Every structure is written in C-alpha cells, then in structure tokens.
Amino acid sequence: MQMRAARMHDYHRPLEIDEVPVPEVGRNHVLVKVAATGMCRSDYQLLDGYFRDGLPVDFPFIPGHEVAGTVAELGADVPKSAGLSEGDLVVVDPNWGDGTCRQCHEGNQQLCGNGQLVGFGPNGGFAEYMVAPFDHVISMADQPDHDPQYLAPLTDAGITPYRGMKKLRDAGKLGAGRTVVVNGIGGLGGYAVQYARLLGGGATVLGFARSDEKLEVATEYGAHHTVNVRDKTSEDVQNELEDLTGRRTVDAVLDCAGSVESLGLAATILATEGALSQVGLMGDRVELPIFPFVSGEKSYFGSFWGNHNDLQEVLALASQGLIKHHIVPVKLDDINDNLEALGRGDIVGRAVVVFD
Ligand SMILES: [Zn+2]
C-alpha cells in the first residue's frame, strides 16, 4: 500500500510530497493512520539546519512530531494490557527513550541521551501513516468525540509550556501577589497563558508579544494584561509594567520565544528571587547578567518538551474542557507555504496539517 508523505531530501530545501510505501509495523509497534499533525516552528528550524549537529537525520526524512490519528494495525507482540484496538483514536507521545537510563527510569524519556524524538530521527506525521512504539501510543478511545486537530498540538505546543510552567510553580515562584509573564504568544504561548491561570495560584498573568493580533489571543486565554514589546526598550516595558501592575519587576517569566531580545528583557525585569523558565529555541545562546542573578538569587531553568505524565495531565485538562485552542487547518499540499510563515512568525495559534 502507498501513502502520501511530505519528505525532506536535504537541508535548506522545501519538503516534497512523495508517494511512498506505508511503513511496515514492527512487532512492538502500532501503525497509526494520521488524522492531524501540528506544525511547529521547530519544523522550520529542522529544515533550516538548526538541529543539524544535535539531531542529524537521514534523508529522505518525514518530519512532524505532533500527531493524532487512529490505530490502523497492531504489531504481533503488542500486549492486551496496552489497551489499544484497531480504529481507536490515539495521540503519539513523541519522546522515545531507551528505557534504561536514569532519566528514563525517572519518567523523563525526553531527556534520554540515547532516545529518539519522533519527527527528528524516526519518521513523523507529515504523512498518511506512521509507526510508533506501542507504549508511546495513548488511546483516547473512551473519548471518541475529541477532534484530532485539537489533540495533535497538545503533544508539543501543549506539553512544552505546561512543563515549563510546572517548574515555576514547583519552585514556588507563582501564587497570589506575584506576577508571571508569558513572553511570546505563538503556538506554545497561547497554551502557556492558560497554564499560568490554571497552575498560577492566583498570580497576575501578563502576555508579551510583538503583534497585537497575538496579544488578543493571550487576552482571550486569560491574560490579565498584555504588552506589545515590539521596538520597545526594557525601560519602556518597565514603565508599562508599573502602570499595569504597580511594580517594575515580575516574579516569573516563561520564555516561549528564546530570542536574544526576549531573554534580555526577561533578565532585566526579573525581581529578586525571580525565575526564568526557558522553552523557546529561537536563538542559540543565553546571556544573563551575573551579579544581578547571583545577588538577587534569581534562577534560570531550561525546560525541554514534556514527559508521558505531562502529556497525560494535559490530555486530562483538555478532556475536562479546560484548554482552548486556536487552530489553523492546513492541507498537506500547502505545507511549505505554512513552514515559511512559521519561520516569519506569521502564524497566529497553531497550524495543523489535517488529513482526509
Ligand atoms: Zn534513557
């Protein structure tokens, strides 16, 4: 059987829509008929060579790491206890660790040194079918009314800021009387604002972005205040902060952009004992002012993607109707135009490739 797949044949080249064989399902694997695959800025970066050294891929290669679909076939050794049946609505937990290292045993397969990230090593979901290990396929069969185009983005755009926000919460940086900023309201930031409200313990939530259209999404998702930071100095932003919150500093920042500018701004506005949680990957280095960070006991956390439990928690919140989505459906044939738009930062919400 043949399928259509958007494949990468080299760096710095558009994806090509190829007719290729449907992959064979391994004994411990599941063949997923893909219904929806989210498009991430990191897909643009993959084509652009950003991950060339850290996550080299073999060409031709099928990207796409935010996948929802249905079970098309189960491998011969998939145990009954996996609770999977043909036709089930499923999402793919995208981080496949080796299962043997300390990080895997702690449940953090996304941190495994020998692991695989689907769509960055194993073929992903910009195709009509893909295979995944059975223990990374999560059945939503008890909630068949879920729309795959809303489920797919939860596996990265949904869980990445969730984990980042949990780090701020667990470090005691949120709560009543404190202020948390979500910097960058793109695919991740729209979810991040909602987590700031859900996990914030009453903290005041601000959204920062460089476009009013994106800030409207932040407001719709529960930000108490927003600041358009385009072409503004740190001092301009602090003046606005003072007008909005009565303070020139904030206690926590979840940075979903990762640019030199966004990190510089975050470092400047962070209060004593404040914390910066970093999930955005736009730039390639972090510069922090040492004396203010040391003397003010400020913290910087890297936070990478999310583990299986993070995903289960986000799926549970979504099932309870607590997560709003802003989805832009895309046809597979239009994937390159949308990748370029992602590179420019022109997508409001999450673009999702939807299959028939
Ligand atoms: Zn491992």
Image (cartoon, rainbow, N blue to C red):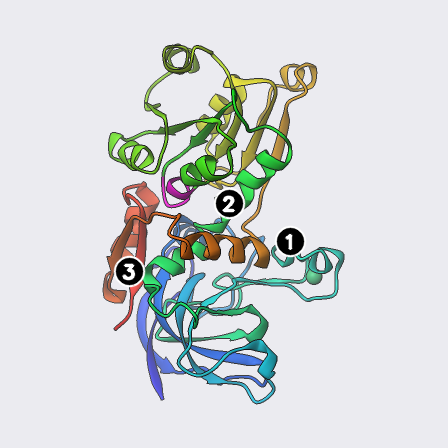
- Callout 3: helix, strand or loop? helix
Residue 83 appears left or right of 242: right
x and y percentages locating residue 91 in the rendered image: 45, 66
Few, some or many residues within 10 Å of mark 2 (<14, 14–19, 20+): many
The answer to whether 289 appears left or right of 216 in the picture is right
**What type is the residue that disc 2 sits on?**
Tyr
Give the label, 1 or 3, closer to the camera: 1
Q: Is residue 91 above or below residue 170?
A: below
Q: Say few, some or many: other residues with alpha carbon within 10 Å of mark 3 (under 14 / 14 to 19 / 20 or more).
A: many
Question: Who's the residue at 48% across and 40% down the image?
Answer: 280
For the C terminus, the quadrant is bottom left
Question: Which residues are drawn in magenta?
Answer: 186-191
Can you give x and y, in whole percent of width and height, for residue 340 in the image?
Answer: 30, 50
- Residue name at image x 57 percent, y 89 percent: 76
Residue 151 appears at what percent x and percent y?
A: 39, 60
State the CA–CA distance, disc 2 to disc 3: 27 Å
Tell me the number on the disc at residue 162: 2
Residue 43 or residue 90, whichever sits in front: 90
Which is more N-terminal, label 2 or label 1? 1
Q: In this orientation, which residue lies closer to the viewer: 71 or 263?
A: 71
Image position of 14 (left or right of 52): left
Judging by the rendered image, the residue that carries numbered circle 3 is 335
